[in-house]
Image (cartoon, rainbow, N blue to C red):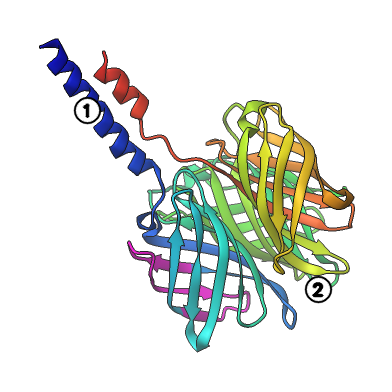
């Protein structure tokens, strides 16, 4: 009798592991749904600008419809395409828009909650693309905006070029921006003096922000993720800058061990000689924050090995540090912010080749589906 009970338990255990193991892995069905994309494009003829829009994917990864809009308000229909995701959450594929425009995405990474993808790509008009897509889902209200947000923004200005700013802004329960500040690469800091944000029931964000000196930024579109802790957005200001960025909400408690793991990074670089382009790759971090390895590649396929580095993170999830790559390249990150799920970071940086960097990194791994508690119940 005891052996029979034991056999049933073992069979149930194996079945649970098989079921939850398959649920944890990524598959093309995780792509199914409507995605909100926010993309920076660097084109040799047009310059650097953003596009945003939505695209809908079926359970096989086929893109069935969508559209996107540029800063001038021009909208193009998405007519087709195919995306794939492997068991580790690495995404790739193509997208086709009216007029024969075809975008190719050699790589992207889906987060553990299967609701955010960071990616790089290029199209047949010689543009280099880097962006974030956030999956539709959930229900939202203006109170979800309340709190302190850490913003990391790339600005393209006809006079000043392409650079980043980062900082914080605090929003009350009505969506009013009550204070904040941000810093540029030269260390100049400006106070945020006001503004108003709105959000609809689908999590689509819009609004304005006011800064000392009369600078006003307008955000025509942004999207909050289902966990209500990350917003991707595009905008412009009255100094003719085009802005694209990510904001991560404050909250949670963090330590150096949260940095441990393999991170997939997608970075836009603005270099005075090489122009604006992307790099992507992985870096491996131990439980003390030490970078123990990794590599990254550029659009031409050149790969550079990461040899060393050190990251630190405070209890609020704000991190900084450096990395060292072959050839003596050293990158410095003055600020980054980890999300409350500890699986995504947004950051800014610079290197000793005079590049300014802004990017997103997504941690390797797969979401917990509660297997351990169920196993504990099984043996209780």
Coordinates of residue 357 in the picture (x, y in percent): 77, 55
Q: Earlier in the sequence, mark 1 or mark 2?
A: 1
Placement of 171 over or under 204, stated as above or below: above
Placement of 144 over or under 74, stated as above or below: above
Q: Residue at x 57, y 78 (%)?
A: 73
* Of the two numbered discs 1 and 2 in the rendering, the one whose residue sits closer to the viewer: 1
**Callout 1 secondary element:** helix
View extreme (left): residue: 1
In screen coordinates, is 86 left or right of 210?
left
Q: Residue at x 89, y 57 (%)?
A: 353
Q: Which mark is residue 12?
A: 1
Quadrant in the picture for residue 308: top right
Q: Which mark is residue 158?
A: 2
Placement of 207 over or under 63, stated as above or below: above
Coordinates of residue 306 in the picture (x, y in percent): 76, 46
Coordinates of residue 236 in the picture (x, y in percent): 68, 66
Q: Tag 1: Cα neighbours inside 10 Å, few (<14), some, or many (≥20)? A: some
Instruction: State yes or no: residue 52 in magenta.
Output: no
Q: Quadrant of the C terminus?
A: top left
Q: Residue at x 56, y 36 (%)?
A: 342
View extreme (top): residue: 2
Q: Tag 2: Cα neighbours inside 10 Å, few (<14), some, or many (≥20)? A: few
Q: Which mark is residue 167?
A: none
**Is residue 351 or residue 216 the one in the foreground?**
351
Residue range corresponding to the magenta coloring:
54-77
């Amino acid at each position: 009798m005891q052996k029979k009970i034991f056999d049933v338990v073992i069979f149930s255990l194996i079945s649970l592991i098989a079921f939850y193991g398959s649920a944890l892995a990524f598959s093309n069905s995780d792509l199914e749904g409507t995605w909100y994309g926010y993309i920076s494009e660097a084109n040799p003829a047009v310059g650097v600008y953003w596009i945003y829009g939505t695209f809908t994917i079926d359970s096989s990864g086929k893109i069935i419809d969508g559209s996107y809009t540029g800063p001038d308000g021009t909208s193009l229909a998405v007519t087709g395409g195919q995306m794939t995701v492997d068991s580790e959450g690495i995404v790739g594929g193509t997208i086709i828009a009216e007029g024969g425009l075809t975008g190719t995405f050699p790589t992207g990474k889906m987060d553990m909650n299967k609701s955010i993808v960071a990616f790089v790509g290029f199209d047949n008009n010689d543009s280099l693309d880097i962006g974030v897509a956030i999956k539709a889902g959930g229900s939202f209200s203006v109170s979800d905006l309340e709190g302190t947000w850490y913003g990391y923004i790339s600005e393209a200005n006809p006079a000043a070029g392409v650079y980043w700013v980062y900082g914080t802004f605090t929003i009350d329960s009505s969506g009013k921006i009550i204070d904040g500040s941000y810093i540029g690469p030269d260390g100049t800091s400006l106070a945020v003096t006001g503004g108003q944000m709105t959000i609809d029931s689908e999590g689509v964000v819009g609004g304005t922000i006011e800064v000392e000196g009369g600078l006003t930024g307008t955000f025509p579109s942004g999207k909050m993720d289902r966990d209500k802790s990350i917003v991707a957005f595009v905008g412009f200001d009255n100094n003719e800058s085009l802005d694209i960025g990510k904001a991560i909400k404050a909250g949670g408690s963090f330590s150096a061990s949260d940095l441990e793991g393999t991170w997939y990074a997608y970075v836009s670089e603005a270099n005075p000689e090489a122009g604006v382009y992307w790099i992507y790759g992985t870096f491996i971090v131990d439980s003390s924050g030490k970078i123990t390895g990794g590599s990254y590649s550029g659009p031409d396929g050149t790969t550079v090995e990461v040899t060393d580095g050190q990251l630190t993170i405070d209890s609020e999830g704000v991190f900084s540090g450096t990395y060292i790559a072959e050839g003596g390249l050293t990158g410095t990150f003055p600020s980054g912010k980890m999300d409350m799920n500890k699986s995504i970071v947004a950051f800014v940086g610079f290197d000793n080749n005079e590049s300014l960097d802004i990017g997103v990194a997504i941690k390797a791994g797969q979401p917990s589906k509660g297997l351990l508690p169920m196993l504990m119940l099984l043996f209780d």
